[in-house]
Amino acid sequence: MSHQDGLSRRAHWAGGETIASLLMAKTLAQPELVSLAAGFVDQQSLPVELTRRALEAIWSDPERAWAGLQYGTTIGYPPLREAILERMLGADGRTPGELNVSAEQVVVTAGSNQLLFLVGDMLLDPDDIVICGAPSYFVFLGTLGNMGARAIGIEIDQHGLIPNAVEDQLARLESAGELGRVKMFYVTSYYDNPSGVTIPAERRAALVEIAKRWSRRSNIYIIEDAAYRELRYYGEDTPSLRAFDPEGDTVIHTGTFSKSFSPGIRVGWGILPRRLLGPVLAEKGNLDFGSPNLNQLLMTTVMELGLFDEHLKVLRDSYRKKIDAMLRAADELLGPIDGIQWVRPTGGLYVWLRLPEGIDTGLSSPLFDRAVKEGVLYVPGEYCYPSNVHRPRKNMLRLSFGIQSCESLRRGVDSLARAIRQVL
């Protein structure tokens, strides 16, 4: 296949302008808008003082400072990798022996999106299949599109991806002779982006068992995107999907400090099955020769000094107030409108709304236009559905409570309610 413009197939698969850039342009053009679209973290909660303390600890030790300013390794700074693994094992209540895992399987990347890209690039050929939720994280859907892969979406319920529905889809693909094309499942296991749901423990175990049992033609992996695990405001923690993979050959566990500490530092990670380490590290070495070493040393110091948990407490307290404010506003302002439903998440940054059938939330819809005129911005839900979904739900939308104050959240929900009433 050739193109007269000289661009590669992947350049064409990338498509046009993304929804994120379109919404950003709208926000910049109208700064008075209450943006409930951007999934950013709260500006006022960024750990400026704690970061200063960690940097002072680094600069006060010449050996440590030299190490931070020097090249690092492709796989990442060893003490940080050890700390990441220790934290996951502690949260899951498992030992390294129980999960057949070591710090040698932890790869540090420039944010978790780089890890998602590296794994996808190493596993997916054009027309290969990734099974995910419908809806799902739209940035990763874009990444899969760039690779020429097919994202097959399966409708979720209030507990996320449904194991029986996954099995049914695999059976259909086997009948069509395409089971060998299935390379992975993708799940955001905690406080999903965009739906806000968390997969319960019994479903986690079931999904891992299904992936192992159906790995008949080729290995089927599960990418567990745990970006929001630390943002828990209510209830108890749940063991990761990796905790249900004692052989360590199925689950690719990814995480990031972007939501839980600082997105500007750009430190993420993956805990990989051993057979994927060589290919992923070879690709990463070709791309960047290792993620920024100073940033890794900074996060290591933050954790060693106990500053990470100190910040998490402040962050959770702040976001708990915000999620309460948004849900309270939804109850009072959206609740009286017939046909509106929403998920009540216990963590994360998002609330997923279903509007009455027949209301289109898309960028060119009357509702979106009216919402902007009323002073509020949201993410149209249709962008969160894989392209295989022949009839993506046009009446869904995603709200984020991360960057706005409690007062602005109420004002934004009020504006949205007015827009919906006008369209109705």
Image (spheres, rainbow, N blue to C red):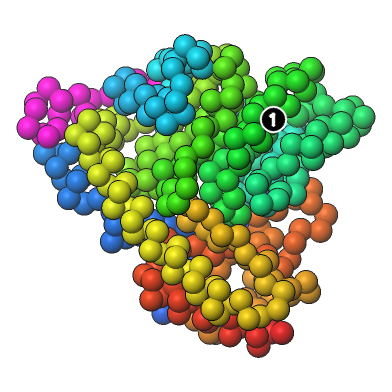
> Is 94 part of what is drawn in magenta?
no
Residue that carries the numbered disc 1 in the rendered image: 206
Magenta highlight range: 57-75
The residue positioned farthest toward the bottom in the image shown: 422
> Is 70 part of what is drawn in magenta?
yes
Q: Residue at x 58, y 85 (%)?
A: 418
* Vertical placement of residue 407 versus 201, above or below: below
Q: Residue at x 91, y 31 (%)?
A: 176
- Asked whether residue 30 appears in the rendered view, the answer is no
The residue positioned farthest toward the right in the image shown: 175
Split into 4 quadrants, where in the image is the N terminus?
top right
Seen in the image, is 169 located left or right of residue 341? right
In the rendered image, residue 215, in percent from the top left (x then y), is placed at 75, 20
* Vertical placement of residue 291 versus 192, above or below: above
**Front-lying residue, 382 or 207:** 207
* Vertical placement of residue 266 versus 371, above or below: above
Q: Residue at x 51, y 81 (%)?
A: 414
Q: Amino acid at mark 1?
A: Ala
